Image (spheres, rainbow, N blue to C red):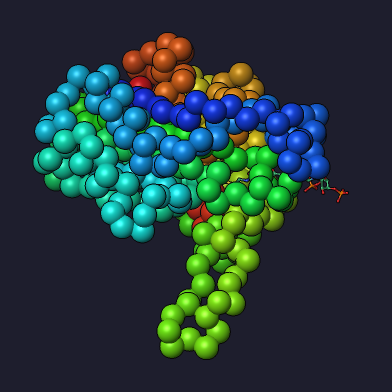
Amino acid sequence: MIRTRIMATGACVPEQIITNDDLSKIVDTSDEWISQRTGIRERRISAGENTSALAIGTAKQVIERAEISPEDVDLIIVASVTPDYGTPSLACMVQKELGMVNAVAFDVVAACSGFMFALSIADKYIKTGVYRNAVVIGAETLSKIVNWEDRTTCVLFGDGAGGAYVEASEEGGIIAEELGSKGELCDILTEGHTACDNAFNDESGDHDPKYYIYMDGRAVFKFAIKKVVESTRNVLAKADVDMEDIAYVIPHQANARIIDVVAHKLKMDDSKFYKNMEHYGNTSSASVPMALNELNEKGLIQRGDKIILTGFGGGMTWGTMLVEW
Ligand code: COA
């Protein structure tokens, strides 16, 4: 059976490190509050790099590690809620910069579940034989849409990009997945709202304050735990795989406490849940591929291992995949 297999991973982050102590100089917060409530100690914040630069840096690393030529790439999908432009897409900017002249390129929006949605789309094209391979990326400069005066959100997010090169394979690959959307909860996490200003709208100029990230933290917390637990159970049941057979779970890196509760509810050992939010915070669609890349670079997963990738985010959305490495 043809499956979609992850052949190489990569990541790219801005150089500038902003610690919790740095944040306590601009908002009323402390290292103690942030690290105890979230597990985050520092994050990368753009000193000028826009999202395309991080996506391009990731794509370059991914194709070098996969040892393929840019012309051989069939499909580029970038997930992001912070693109440089409405158009061109980030995927087209990546295509141009790296000379992936034969690829089809487009972006998807599913907030922090974005990489999971993008990987799922690539999987369908590959499994059905439409394309042989894809570069799939999650990339964000959330620092552009964070309200730096709001201590309840600005301490949580960071900038970065991560991605993977996937191709058709008869061994390993994506075994089962669950994607989900619950639009009725769309107001609990929003960003980037633009007002309907135009020359014929009398209310032009009356801008909505929700351009910056707005979040009902407690509601998101509850949603995340419920959906990550349910979807992980569902995906394992679909594939008839036991929890004990999972080498690692790579969850969205929003909050260490969410991950600890999920591990407890799934009766899984904490140590199987990979965490790196300590250094990067929540990088939205980049978080799962950045963590996967780190795990891969450290040599912690071997071919044949079964892993779970799981993300949740605005929309509200979620996506969980069982992958044989
Ligand atoms: N520094 C210091 N105090 C802060 C603070 C900060 N950065 N942010 C909030 N506080 C204060 C609050 O004002 C509140 O004070 P009060 O009790 O005097 O009113 C107190 O800390 C507790 O706030 P609360 O919101 O109840 O904290 P919490 O334990 O729910 O943690 C989050 C807040 C945001 C960390 C938590 O709700 C969370 O992680 N939610 C999920 C977020 C998430 O996953 N988002 C990404 C989705 S993709």
- Give the percent coordinates (x, y) of residue 301: 42, 15
- Give left or right: position of 149 versus 159: right
- Give the percent coordinates (x, y) of residue 280: 57, 30
**In this rendering, is residue 131 above or below 270?**
below
Residue pictured at 27% horizontal, 50% vertical: 106
Residue found at the very far top of the displayed protein: 299
The reply to whether residue 241 is visible in this rendering is no
Residue pictured at 11% horizontal, 41% vertical: 102
Residue 207 sits in quarter: bottom right
User: Observer-nearest residue: 72 or 177?
Assistant: 72
Residue 258 sits in quarter: top right
Q: Quadrant of ligand 1?
A: top right
Q: On the rendered image, what quadrant is the N terminus found in?
A: top left
Residue pictured at 36% horizontal, 54% vertical: 85
How many numbered discs, if any? 0
User: Observer-nearest residue: 165 or 105?
Assistant: 105
The reply to whether residue 153 is visible in this rendering is yes
**In this rendering, is residue 131 above or below 15?**
below
Q: On the rendered image, what quadrant is the C terminus found in?
A: top left
Residue pictured at 38% horizontal, 13% vertical: 302
- Give the percent coordinates (x, y) of residue 114: 43, 46
- Give the percent coordinates (x, y) of residue 82: 45, 49
**In this rendering, is residue 31 above or below 316?**
above
